[in-house]
Image (cartoon, rainbow, N blue to C red):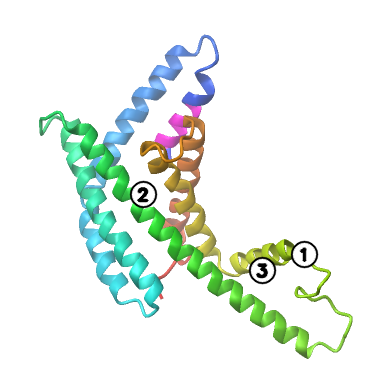
Amino acid sequence: ATQYTCILLRYLLEPKAGREEVVMKLKKLESSVSTGRKWFRLGNVVHAIQATEQSIQATDPVPRLCLTLANLNRVVYFICDAVLWAKNVGLTSGNNREKWQMWSARHYYYFLLLSLVRDLYEITLQMGRVAHDKVKVEKSSQDPLGYSVIDEETEWLQSFLLFLFRSLKRHPPLLLDTVKNFCDILIPLNQLGIYKSNPGIIGLGGLVSSLAGIITIVYPQMKLKIC
């Protein structure tokens, strides 16, 4: 959260005159925190391997496939991250830093893309349950003129958004996980040149993702479980 707040503030302050010293301090703080985060993540390779083993045991084949492949890419991402940290602190030498950065961004992108596919699959399941419940309520209703989302006068987009809203409202961990993965994927998309974003968008997306991650730590029940 500190790192991406620095990126966002730096983007907002750079165009303003007389803010050069503050911008430079934010840039140094951002660089220091980034290196520190890589150091804190050194043990995450083990966690990613454990997550892969857990995802293999998922009962639903779609999440099982998506999460297993996602976590395998996450393992490689953390290995690349550890190599980059070693280069940052001078433990290794060589001129292939850019190559490791691209590998890291690529596998991070694959991890997030597969995680988003799993989120979309879960959303479709939730929307199906909401639609099923709605039909049951309509069949048991005594009012023949009652509202129906499948009525001909109802717009398709309106019905879709209503189902989506009710599905995510019913399942907050799914909403939080989707928002987090969507915000996170902006970073590798920018690094790989697939979709260029300005530092302000990257900083804001990273900050929102960090806050979502903090929520899942403070409230473990908000973390999306493997089914």
Quick check: 109 above or below 69? Answer: above
Residue indicated by mark 1: 155
Quick check: 59 above or below 45? Answer: below
* Residue located farthest toward the top when viewing the structure as drawn: 18
Which circle's residue, 1 or 2, is located before the other in the chain? 2
Residue for point 74% across, 62% down: 158
Indicate the position of residue 186 as horizontal and vertical percent values: 45, 43
Q: Which of marks 1 and 2 is in front?
A: 1
Q: What element carries label 1?
A: loop
Q: Nearer the viewer, mark 3 or mark 1?
A: 1
Q: Is residue 131 magenta?
A: no
Q: In which quarter of the image is the N terminus?
A: top left
Which circle's residue, 3 or 1, is located before the other in the chain? 1
Indicate the position of residue 2 as horizontal and vertical percent values: 41, 36
Q: Which amino acid does label 2 sit on?
A: Tyr
Q: What residue type is labelled 1?
A: Glu
Magenta region: which residues? 2-9
Indicate the position of residue 8 as horizontal and vertical percent values: 49, 31
Which secondary structure is most common in the magenta stretch? helix
Which circle's residue, 2 or 3, is located before the other in the chain? 2
Q: Residues within 10 Å of mark 2 (few under 14, many from 20)?
A: many
| Foreground residue among 100 and 58 | 100
Residue for point 42% across, 41% down: 194
Residue indicated by mark 2: 109
Residue 220 visible, this orientation: no
Answer whether labels 3 and 1 touch (C-beta < 8 Å). Answer: no
